[in-house]
Amino acid sequence: MIPPYSAPDFSQPAFASCPVAQTLPAPKDGVAPENFHGTSNHPEYVQIKKNEWVLVKENRMDTVIVIRNGEPFSVEARNLKEGDNVVVGRGEEGEFGVYIHTEGFVAQSQKAGEKFAFMTRGSRETPFSRSYDHLYELLRHEKEHGFITWVLGPAVAFDRDSRHAMASLIERGYCQGLLAGNALATHDMEAALFGTGLGRDIYTREVKPMGHYHHLDLLNKVRHLGSIQKAIPELGLDSGIICACEKTKTPYVLAGSIRDDGPLPEVIQTSSDAQDRMRDFARKSTCVITLATQLHTIAFGNMVPSYRVMKDGAIRPVYFYVVDMSEFSADKLANRGSAQSTAILTNVQDFMINLYNNL
């Protein structure tokens, strides 16, 4: 199910002349020294001492590497402290003491391919049957052995069946963490209170009289009560995604945006604080599924490495699925560096029903 990892062979002659990685102190809080090494989302090894290459265990792209007590750590530049020992030198093949390993999970059979072939790039014409079957198998495995993070856009809550499907998957243990914005939680709770999403019945799509007030009324009621946790029993909410998270004590992060109404009390309105909380999930995730939320998808994709070092020291891939009707969303994430992501181009409501029926 989970492919084995092949580490680099540092005994090869090509590594013999590689120097020990050099560091310079951070000149002030939040500032890296000149010529700092910027990380990728691949496994990166740092030569701490001659012939001692150490893997950065919790990597992510666009950070710097700080050496602490002989260990390399991936640190956002804004979190640097004056005097931190930051790795410098911009190379990927060990020429400055850092080696980026891109083929750790690539089987030998995958390395050789046809020189010419059709349908090499995913599109709406791509057959996704194998992707679905692999995902069903993967989720059953990750439920017991991994950490599944969902990144949800509000479209999941606008349909009765997809909303029920997501809540059911949470209740059955297929979600260890949920990331979203104010809109997903607001409209999910609107559906629990009024049966609507943005004023439309989430099953019949009928526009309810003065329904455009529903999400505003919901926000006002929750803010008056002080928290989602207090509002659920007070308002008699007993269905949906957020209720399922509270019921199962599944952690979630709601990151704010400039356009938010309200927002709900739990929404983190400072972007750097929201990023730090999302990064906590990135460090744990072994499987990520993002649904119809371009900005959250790219944001979290940039935080998630392509691998994870488990407690027993085993190195395994992190699976990243992008589910959207638009090819643009999947392409944009890949263009931002998350080339290992798998796209399933479909309506997210149909996707959720497929998962529900097969799991």
Image (cartoon, rainbow, N blue to C red):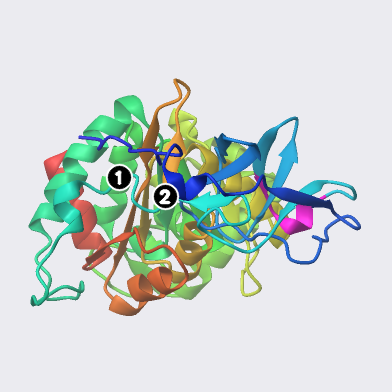
Using the image, determine if residue 118 lies above or below residue 295.
below
Residue range in magenta is 74-80
The quarter of the picture where residue 341 lies is: bottom left
> Which callout, 2 or 1, points at the residue further toward the start of the chain?
1
- List x then y, in percent, for residue 246: 49, 35
- List x then y, in percent, for residue 349: 24, 61
Q: CA distance from mark 2 to mark 1?
A: 10 Å
Q: Report the disc number at residue 306.
A: 2
Using the image, determine if residue 68 lies above or below residue 297.
above
Using the image, determine if residue 293 lies above or below residue 274.
below
Q: Classify mark 2: helix, strand or loop.
A: loop
Q: Characterize the local packing of mark 1: few (<14), some (14-19) or many (20 or more) Cα atoms within 10 angstroms.
A: some
Q: Which of the image's four quarters has the C terminus? A: top left
Residue at point 77%, 50% (across, down): 23
Q: Is residue 194 magenta?
A: no
Q: Is residue 237 visible?
A: no
Amino acid type of the residue that numbered disc 1 sits on in the rendered structure: Phe
For residue 76, side relative to residue 318 (left or right): right
- List x then y, in percent, for residue 247: 45, 31
Q: Characterize the local packing of mark 2: few (<14), some (14-19) or many (20 or more) Cα atoms within 10 angstroms.
A: many
Residue at point 41%, 57% (across, down): 152
Q: Report the disc number at residue 105.
A: 1
Amino acid type of the residue that numbered disc 2 sits on in the rendered structure: Ser
In the image, 3 versus 148, the foreground residue is 3
Q: Check if mark 2's residue and mark 1's residue have beta carbons within 8 Å.
A: yes
Q: Is residue 75 magenta?
A: yes
